[in-house]
Image: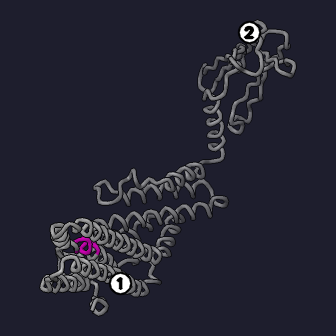
Amino acid sequence: MIKRAVELDMLEPQDNYCKFSSSASDTLGIFNDVKIWWQKLAWPDLENGAVLLTKILDNICSCVLSYSNLIREKVESIFHQYENSTRVFITEQICVGLNNIERVRTEMVKLPAQFGFNELLQKIRESDSGGESAAAQLDATVDRLIVNAAENTEAKVNEFIDTMLDKMHPTLERAVNEACEEQSTVLSQVLDPSLELTMNQLNNSNFKRFLWRVWEVVVDIFTATVMRNSERRKANYFGGVHTILEETLSFFSPPDGKGLDETTAKTPAYTSLMELLESLRMSSESLIAQYYQERYEEQMEEILPCKARLYVKILFTKPGKLIVEVIMAKDMVVEGDTCSITSRGGGLGLQTSHQPVDSYVKVQLVPQEWFPATAIRKTKTQRKQDPAVYEETFE
């Protein structure tokens, strides 16, 4: 009967107030007929009646899984009609099919209460001294039965969505590639009508679940596109991809709250991709500058023991006029260090297994590519036995 109901189902909403179709109603109607039959049966033996009801519920759960598979197969046949489409990859029928599975799954969870299973267990508990143990065992069995069936049906819903995404993937991939190449809104043009349809036709839980999975797939496609072009495209291409990806995030998480939460949507995969794009869209000069900036920040972190300090004074006297005054270097006493540090009157001298060496300070503007006309300067060399006082100025 369930198979026949699915075959006859056109996957159209039954009215303007519900988002599921005839096969879901027919399937639930069958379950209701079984419930009426059970109530009329009024099985006299309480404990045997509970065992029989458990078997009935088990069969109904199996029917729910079978129904889910039948709906999924029917929807897959619909997808074949749109395999060569460059724009339409989801229809109202597909949304209704997903809602049908969720509708039947939701009602399945309520079946024990609708069949009066809890009342039956209570009568068993009150029947004799061993009733409490028998009721507890039956209760655990049915609870496990419903939980497992709900999880299996939930898996079917996820499989349904994955099937949808598999069919959508070529269309999404084409749209992402076109958007990246043309720096256009092609991706939004593809997504907008379909996601608007799913928002209107899917129930809220299915819509959020579906939207999240689409977002994950879109990020994966962007990542694959960037990695494929990382060594053969120029910075302006990745600048465009960066902008498009930001716009796509805004599309999936609009301010009206109907989409994804923006903070949650910034997944590790998205964040990692944005960081990569930040680097790829930079010019060579900017990347070099970033490298030196990071080196400077690392040097400012007090991770390793400080063994000496260099004192300098740096100032601009006018735009483009930089003055660097190298003053002196001073030893720092480090407790527990493996080498001893001598001051030599404020000089910079480390006595380790090697002998102290002469010292000087080199002054260089980096990135060097930015200052090709600026020579590398250095102070006079201070002998190892003299204080490390330089007092030299460079312009």
Identify which residue, 8 or 245, lies in the foreground: 8
Identify which residue, 348 or 337, lies in the foreground: 337
Report which residue position mark 1 lands on: 66
Asked which secondary structure carries label 1, the reply is helix
Classify residue 266 as left or right of residue 114: right
- Tell me which amino acid carries mark 2: Gly
Q: Quadrant of residue 393?
A: top right
**Lateral position of residue 222 relative to residue 26, left or right:** right
Spot occupied by residue 233 in the image (x, y as percentages of width and height): 63, 60
x then y, percent, for residue 147 = 33, 69
Q: Give the alpha-carbon distance from disc 1 to disc 2, as whole Å.
A: 86 Å
Q: Is residue 110 magenta?
A: yes
Q: Secondary structure at mark 2?
A: loop
Q: Tell whether position 98 is magenta.
A: no
Q: Tell me which corner region of the image, top left, top right, bottom left or bottom right, holds residue 232.
A: bottom right
Q: For residue 165, which quarter of the picture?
A: bottom left
Q: Main secondary structure of the magenta part?
A: helix
Residue on which disc 2 sits: 346
Q: Is residue 84 visible?
A: yes
Q: Nearer the viewer, residue 108 or 197?
A: 108
Instruction: Write the start and end of the magenta stretch as one range.
Output: 105-111
Q: Nearer the viewer, mark 1 or mark 2?
A: 1
Q: Position of residue 320 (x, y in %)?
A: 62, 27
In the rendered image, which quarter contains the N terminus? bottom left
Q: Residue at x 35, y 58 (%)?
A: 260
384 vs 74: above or below:
above
- Residue type indicated by callout 1: Ser
